[in-house]
Each structure stands twice: as structure tokens, then as C-alpha cells.
Image (tube, rainbow, N blue to C red):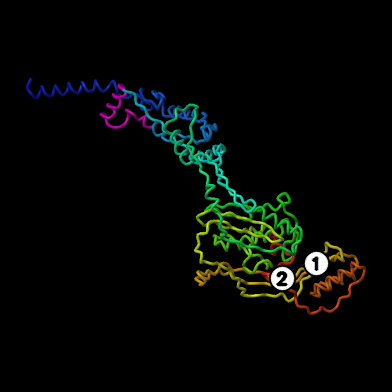
């Protein structure tokens, strides 16, 4: 045998040996997983793709039925079923990989994979995800129930002296940190059994100290209005609203809502029926007069130079402040007076009633220059005086009935300007707001329900006369058993409401399109 023949004989022998070596480990079933393949703890040997998927899904279902108890503030416990946390299987592709192991690629790759399986099991990790929105909802609702609320340092004024009380720290679940940690626990660390998890808890430090609050001795703004002509019910409403605001402490950045503080307007909350306006007419509503409270506070806030975030003028002029210096409150119209403590220190609101006058003082730490003075000027741009009366007929009221004559309201367009002086020299003048007040004529409502056509016609003629005085006289005549005699309408100048800035007459709280209370 020559050298070439010997070489060929050797190659044949090697090939035979390789074939013998490969054949025993050749994959026998392309549709099933080879022996020694695990999907985490699941022995997937011999399983089809569908069987492997079912096996993993069964494991996931078992996990979903488990309960993890969340430990919050003070060791409070909130049991949560894992299904509520939205646990899901996120890498189903591992089943496809497991089925193709030892069956795909070139012969060398398949050979190596199958030989490795003979020596060591192949384990695929099952990966999980969870619903972060669901976890966040549970943390912010069910777990927050165990939180211990902090108590900020408080301040009261007793007999002209401030009394401060230290705050108390609270404790709460740190929702952001707890969300991240719980997600990692569920998806990476959890063993799939019932268990517990301690949430992240942080201290919620109280705002302010007694020492800081006792330094609030400077009056930043003060304003007073009179309600000396108001009746008993309206006076009671003004007093009640003042008392509800008195003692409010605003820390830096806090926003104050007058409506939120003084509502609801109900008997249970201390309010009585008093006059307010509805479409230019006086009606009785719970809380009538409350706008004088918000208006008085508004002017004190302006003098303190706090940030006003919401203010509305009345629909018609009121008499206890000048035009554009008012702030209306209306439940039905959604009107509120809001402001923010934009100073670096807390502000204490003191409100009190004395001799039918309401006063608000805003206490804080004065940081403005001693030479700085702030004042406000009301500028009337336009006045509209109604030139006739308005008579309303009410078929639901008997002939002879009449309401009181409602006084005329002059319409105004006005602006409020802020003037700042430093050491007696004006340094700025800026417009703060612009207000429009509707004009409203003198008005009266008379009843016209009667079976006597003569009386009905006489009352309707009185209504058509355009004179509130004739309409009242006609109603009074019917009430006295007489048939009204309608005289030609007299020329009479309408009478103004109390001029702005003077003591008000008994007036509704908000002469607007809808009752403001």
C-alpha cells in the first residue's frame, strides 16, 4: 500500500469514527424539547411547545393566587393578592428556544448543544413584569390608610396675645421608593409563595415651630367695613363668615380659598336667610351678606401685597367699598376669592366683629422697607343711570300683593389702581383690576291673580305705566277693596343706591345674575 492509499484509508476511518460519535446524540424528535431542559423549576424534557407553555402558565396562575402582605406605617398590614398587582410572564419566547435547542444550526452547533445537555441541564429563566399603575393605586389608597398625619405648628390669638403650639411629625409610605422596590421584588426576587414585603416609610416633618410662629407680630394689611344698617340675619351671616376665617394660618406657598373656608351655606353651618340678588331682584338665600366678608378680606390682602389668584366683581354695585374694590362669592356661578401667601413667613388671619364692623388683620413678618407705602385708588370710567322703572307682574300672587320697591342701581365701569410711594415719593402706579357693574332700574312686583276683569285691567295698566309708585298704589288700592285709578305717569328721577364708600343700606350680598351667597 502506497502513501496515498494509506492517507485515504485513514480519512475513511476518521469519518467513520465521527459518524459513530454523532449518531448517538442526534435529536430524535424535532417537535419536542430535549431531555435536560428546564424552564426555571419546570422539567420540560419531552414536552411539546404547547405543553411547555401550559406548564409555565400554570405556574403563573399559581403565583397570581398567592398573597403578599404589605407592611406599612406602624407595622400596619395590607394583604394583596398578586393578581391585583398585575403580574405577567414577559418572555414566552424561551419555549421556542427550548424546542429548537439541538435542532437548529449547522451540525457542529447541534452536536455541541446536545453533548452539553448530556453533561449539564439547560435552565431558562422565566421573567416577570407587573402593572406599575395598579401597584401605585394600591400604595396611594389602601396602604396610605395607615399613614400617620403630621400636625403643623399652630398659632392662636387669645385676648390679644399669640399662643403657639409645636407640631407633631407624621409618618407615611414613600410611594415612589416603595413602587420601585416592590416591582423589583415581584419580578426578580419573589419565590412565588405567600409572604410579606416591608414598604419604604419616611418621616413627614411638621411645618413651622412655635418660636417661628411667635415672631408673626407685624400687621401686613388691615381693613374694616361697616354693616351698621344690616338686619339681624344678614349681620349674623357676616359674623359667621368672619368667625370661620378667623385663626387661619397660611404657610409660605399656601393658597387660601374663601369659598372652601366658609361653605357650605346651610343652617347647620350657621347661616340664615338674608337678601341676595337674582336677576336684579332681591331674594332670600342662605348666607346673604357673605360677600362683605370676602370683600373686606380682599382689601386687607391687597394692602399686604399678597398674590391674588382669583377675584370677581359683583354684577351690580355694592355700597360698603368703592367700585372695583369688591370680591364676590357665588356658589351657583362658581365665584371665589383666592390668594397665595407669597412671603417667606407664615401669615395669620385675624377676623373680628365690633359694633357692626368687620375687620381683618393679616399678621406676618414685615420685610418691606419702612418707607414703602401702598394705597389703592378707585377710578370710575363710566356711569349708567337707568331712566325708567321696571314693573313685574306675577299671576301666582293675588291682586293686592306687592313687593317692596327695589332701589335703582347705577351701572359703572371702573378700575382699581395700586400706588406705591417710597419715602413720600410715588415710584409706581399700576392697574390691579377692571370691573363692570350692570345698571338696574327701580323695580316692583305686583300680583295680578283675580277674577274681576276691571281690577285685572287696572293692575296691568298700572304695570304698563312704567312707574313703580303707580304700581304700588294700584296694588294697595286693591288690597283696600278699591278699584285702582291710574294717573298719567309722573316724571321722577330715579333714586341712586347709597354712593360707594358710604354706609350701605340693607343690601343683598351679590347683586348678580344668580344669587351669590
In the rendered structure, the answer to whether residue 278 lies left or right of residue 54 reads: right
**Residue 470 screen position, x and y as percent:** 83, 74
Q: Does the magenta stretch include residue 224?
A: no
Q: Which residue lies most toward the left here? A: 2
**Residue 377 screen position, x and y as percent:** 59, 70
Gap in angstroms between the C-alphas marked 1 and 2: 17 Å
Which mark lies nearer to you, 1 or 2? 2
**Residue 475 screen position, x and y as percent:** 86, 69
Residue, disc 1 = 404
Q: Which residue is drawn at 55% across and 39% down?
A: 148
Q: What element carries label 1?
A: loop
Predominant secondary structure in magenta? helix
Q: Does the magenta stretch include residue 117?
A: yes
In the rendered structure, the answer to whether residue 279 lies left or right of residue 25 reads: right
Q: Which residue is drawn at 52% across and 29% down?
A: 67
The answer to which quarter of the image holds residue 484 is bottom right
Residue, disc 2 = 498
**Up-down relation of residue 171 to residue 492 (above or below):** above
Viewer-side residue, 68 vs 508: 508
Q: How many marks?
A: 2
The answer to which quarter of the image holds residue 256 is bottom right
**Highlighted range, magenta:** 96-119
Amino acid at each position: 500500500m502506497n502513501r496515498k492509499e494509506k492517507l485515504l484509508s485513514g480519512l475513511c476511518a476518521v469519518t467513520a469514527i465521527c459518524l459513530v460519535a454523532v449518531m448517538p446524540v442526534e435529536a430524535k424528535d424535532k417537535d419536542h424539547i430535549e431531555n435536560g431542559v428546564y424552564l426555571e423549576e419546570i422539567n420540560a424534557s419531552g414536552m411539546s411547545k404547547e405543553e411547555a407553555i401550559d406548564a409555565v402558565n400554570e405556574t403563573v396562575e399559581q403565583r397570581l393566587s398567592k398573597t403578599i402582605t404589605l407592611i406599612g406605617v406602624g407595622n400596619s398590614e395590607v394583604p394583596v393578592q398578586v393578581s391585583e398587582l398585575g403580574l405577567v410572564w414577559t418572555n414566552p419566547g424561551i419555549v421556542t428556544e427550548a424546542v429548537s435547542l439541538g435542532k437548529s444550526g449547522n451540525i457542529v452547533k447541534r452536536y455541541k448543544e446536545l453533548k452539553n445537555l448530556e453533561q449539564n441541564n439547560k435552565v431558562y429563566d422565566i421573567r416577570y413584569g407587573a402593572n406599575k399603575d395598579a401597584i401605585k393605586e394600591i400604595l396611594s389608597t389602601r396602604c396610605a390608610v395607615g399613614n400617620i398625619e403630621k400636625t403643623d405648628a399652630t398659632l392662636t390669638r387669645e385676648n390679644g396675645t399669640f399662643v403657639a403650639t409645636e407640631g407633631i411629625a407624621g409618618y407615611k409610605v414613600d410611594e415612589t421608593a416603595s413602587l420601585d422596590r416592590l416591582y423589583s421584588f415581584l419580578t426578580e426576587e419573589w419565590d412565588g409563595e405567600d409572604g410579606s414585603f416591608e414598604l419604604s416609610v419616611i418621616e413627614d416633618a411638621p411645618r413651622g415651630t412655635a418660636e417661628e410662629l411667635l415672631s408673626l407680630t407685624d400687621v401686613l394689611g388691615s381693613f374694616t367695613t361697616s354693616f351698621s344698617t344690616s338686619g339681624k340675619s344678614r349681620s349674623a351671616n357676616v359674623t359667621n363668615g368672619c368667625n370661620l376665617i378667623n385663626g387661619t394660618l397660611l404657610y409660605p406657598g399656601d393658597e387660601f380659598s374663601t369659598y372652601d373656608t366658609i361653605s357650605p351655606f346651610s343652617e347647620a353651618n350657621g347661616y340664615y336667610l338674608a337678601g341676595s340678588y337674582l336677576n336684579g331682584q332681591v331674594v332670600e338665600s342662605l348666607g346673604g351678606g357673605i360677600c362683605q366678608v370676602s370683600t373686606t378680606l380682599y382689601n386687607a390682602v391687597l394692602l399686604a401685597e399678597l398674590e391674588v389668584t382669583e377675584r370677581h366683581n359683583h354684577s351690580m354695585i355694592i355700597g360698603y367699598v368703592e367700585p372695583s374694590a369688591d370680591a364676590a362669592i357665588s356658589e351657583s356661578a362658581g365665584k371665589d376669592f383666592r390668594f397665595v401667601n407669597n412671603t417667606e413667613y407664615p401669615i395669620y388671619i385675624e377676623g373680628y366683629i365690633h359694633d357692626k364692623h368687620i375687620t381683618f388683620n393679616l399678621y406676618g413678618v414685615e420685610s418691606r422697607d419702612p418707607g414703602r407705602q401702598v394705597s389703592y385708588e378707585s377710578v370710575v370710567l363710566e356711569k349708567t343711570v337707568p331712566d325708567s322703572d321696571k314693573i313685574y307682574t306675577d299671576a301666582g300672587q293675588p291682586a293686592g300683593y306687592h313687593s317692596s320697591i327695589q332701589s335703582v342701581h347705577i351701572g359703572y365701569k371702573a378700575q382699581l389702581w395700586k400706588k406705591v410711594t417710597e419715602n413720600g415719593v410715588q415710584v409706581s402706579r399700576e392697574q390691579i383690576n377692571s370691573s363692570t357693574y350692570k345698571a338696574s332700574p327701580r323695580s316692583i312686583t305686583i300680583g295680578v291673580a283675580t277674577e274681576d276683569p276691571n281690577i285685572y285691567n287696572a293692575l296691568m295698566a298700572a304695570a304698563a305705566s312704567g312707574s313703580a309708585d303707580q304700581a304700588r298704589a294700584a296694588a294697595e288700592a286693591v288690597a283696600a277693596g278699591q278699584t285702582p285709578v291710574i294717573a298719567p305717569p309722573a316724571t321722577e328721577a330715579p333714586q341712586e343706591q347709597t354712593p360707594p364708600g358710604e354706609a350701605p343700606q340693607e343690601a343683598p350680598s351679590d347683586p348678580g345674575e344668580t344669587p351669590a351667597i
